[in-house]
Amino acid sequence: MTDPTTTDEDALRPLPPDGRPSGGPRRLLGAVMGDLRAVDGALYAAVAATPTPTLDRTLRHLSHAADHSKISFAIAAALALGGKRPRRAALAGVGAIAVASASANLLGKRLVRRARPDREAARVTVDRHVPMPTSASFPSGHTASAVAFATAVGVVLPPAAVPLGALASAVGYSRIHTGVHYPGDVAAGAVLGIASAAAALAAAAATPSERTQALLTAARSWPRTGIGATARR
């Protein structure tokens, strides 16, 4: 007697609307995503369980200071007082913040709608606490804006790249340390920040410079001041 090629469970399993058996790539993707969420939660729990009394207050203040990109805007204001290149870097950084903030809050959070971590269940010490935001957790808007600003300013003003990159990294980690974001939220925010900076820099490069605009204005005036004037004479 040969073994049956199908089981009763396979025979009774309903087919999806397209008539093909379910499973395969979709099931694999679901398993991978489940594993990634497990790793994400484990990293979050590890940070919460690690006692760091010296860092707690500093990172809490840093996380709070990064609300609404206050740190980045303060740096942009200081750069604007410098020469032409620092001012251009400040404008690029502010533009990158605008793109990152809109992308994170108007698109990312509304599309994914990931719940915030359960800070109490993870036993995040109260010394680290900042107000828990009411918005969705994915991606981290603080990280996206900080990385976008650091990337855009660093491209225009290379000496600022390392210190601003370190500051953006600290802001991102502070959101995990204070218990308001999973590590995956921060990683996604960093990627979004880099993409936002690239978009802002590309838009700035597509805008004619002051010298180009002056040449275009002069070119438009040539028929009136040159050929036209000669013809009237």
Image (cartoon, grey):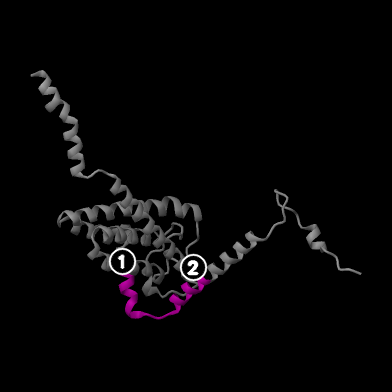
At 43% from the left and 76% from the top, the residue drawn is 47
* Relative depth, front residue between 115 and 210: 210
- 157, 142: nearer the viewer: 157
Q: At which x and y percent is residue 28?
A: 62, 64
The percent position of residue 212, horizontal first and vertical second, equals 21, 42
Pointer 2 local density, CA inside 10 Å: few below 14, some 14–19, many at least 20: few
Look at the image and give the residue range highlighted in magenta.
39-64
Q: Secondary structure at mark 1?
A: helix
Of callouts 2 and 1, which one flags the residue occurring earlier in the amino acid sequence?
A: 2
Residue 182 shows in the view:
no
Verify whether residue 140 appears in magenta: no
In front: label 2 or label 1: 1
Whole-angstrom CA distance, mark 2 to mark 1, is: 29 Å
Q: How far across and how far down the image is residue 116, in percent?
A: 47, 63
Mark 1, residue position? 165
Q: Which mark is residue 96?
A: none
Amino acid on which disc 2 is placed = Asp
Residue 195 vs residue 27: left or right? Answer: left
Q: Badge 2 is on which residue?
A: 118
